[in-house]
Amino acid sequence: MQCSRCLNDKTVRNISFNENGVCNYCVEYDKISNKLNDYKRLEKLILNRFNKIKGKYKYDVALGISGGKDSMYVLFQLINKYHLKVKTFTMNNGFLSKAAKKNIDKMVKEFKVDHEYIEFDREMLKNIYKYSMKHFLVPCIGCSYIGYAAMINYTIKTDAGMCIHGRSPEQMLRKYGNDVFTSFVNLGLKDIDDININTEYKNILDSISTKLDDNIKREIEKILYDGIEDKTFREFVPYFLYHEYDEEKIINFLKEKTSWNPPKEYNHYDCEIHNAAKYIYQKAEGRAHRLPETSVLVRSGKISKEKGNEILANEFIKKPTEELDKLFKFVGLNKNSIFLKAKIYNWYLKKWVSI
């Protein structure tokens, strides 16, 4: 069964359909769609946030950068449009590519901003990725848990007024209504004066903790609170929640205004094992993993269903043997056991879809 409005089908986790065949993700999106398109109000919301913190901390903003188009564009705008003092950082998740590091080092010099690489204990990364792969088949979910904790921690530790990230609307909204990021979106759509950051973030972090076993929970909390005496949280702000997002315009803008020049395949080029994770997802789900993201574009009216299907048809990749070897060697898991689980999950999906 496929949603009558977007491209989502029964292979999407936690999906349901109403009497009109519309999926729950479309229904949830409609509850906030007016707010997402009211750019006059959104500009006011982001300006209020900037005004509240500007000049009150060592840095106005801590910005995570990967060397990709989105974070570089956000950095340019924070400096040149909003005139904020920015501290940039890059998390080395154990798979940071040389190409990304080279581009990051070049761009921070060009923008003349302070920058720092956040390094993690290798054994800790191994343990969390292994846990993530055993439970979710891929390391990405574990990596995102590390990322949330590290970004919140780093923002406080470096004394920045807020943390900003450059996730695209498709990434933010792909599971809106049914994932951790939903809370960040909902908070972002409120006026900053109506939010108690400490209370709200504690609730978000507690909800994440319920998904982890005790050992991994302790590892994540260690990252979150490491070296912090003042446990007053700073806001985690999605830049493209408040600004229009057009990938082609962003790329052309950067090429015109900066020396940004990444590899031809610039999406996720910062992660050396991105295609390995993508391939595992592909084997487990039996379709392009970008289905929920592409569905955001369809339900928001940015592309047609036909265009969405064309995008997804080009998303399938061949087995990336070297990346898979690198991933499994790092986590110390048997490759066959993970692919067996993926095969079983795929069988379950096919059986479920046929009902």
Image (tube, rainbow, N blue to C red):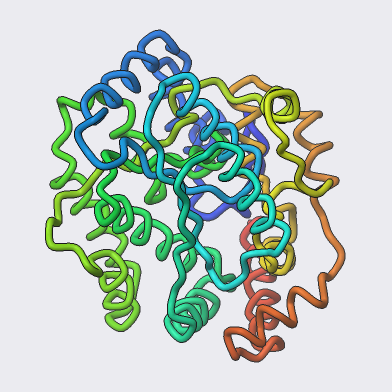
Q: Is residue 107 left or right of residue 65?
A: right
Residue, far top: 40
Of 315 and 192, nearer the camera is: 192
Residue displayed at 32% across by 79% down: 213
* Above or below, comparing residue 220 to residue 169 in the picture: below
Of 207 and 189, nearer the camera is: 189
The reply to whether residue 63 is visible in this rendering is yes
* Above or below, comparing residue 177 to residue 190 in the picture: below
Residue displayed at 26% across by 56% down: 157
Locate residue 17, reporting x and y percent.
52, 39
Q: Quadrant of the N terminus?
A: top right
Q: In which quarter of the image is the C terminus?
A: bottom right
Locate residue 337, reporting x and y percent.
65, 88
Q: In this view, does 40 lie to the left or right of 169?
A: left
* Above or below, comparing residue 148 to residue 59 in the picture: below
Q: Is residue 263 left or right of residue 93?
A: right
Residue displayed at 81% across by 29% down: 306
Locate residue 321, reporting x and y percent.
82, 77
The reply to whether residue 350 is visible in this rendering is no
Choose top left, top right, bottom left or bottom right for residue 283. bottom right
Locate residue 299, reporting x and y percent.
60, 26
* Above or below, comparing residue 247 to residue 102 in the picture: above
Choose top left, top right, bottom left or bottom right for residue 277. bottom right
Residue displayed at 24% across by 44% down: 234
Q: How many marks are shown on the rendered structure?
A: 0
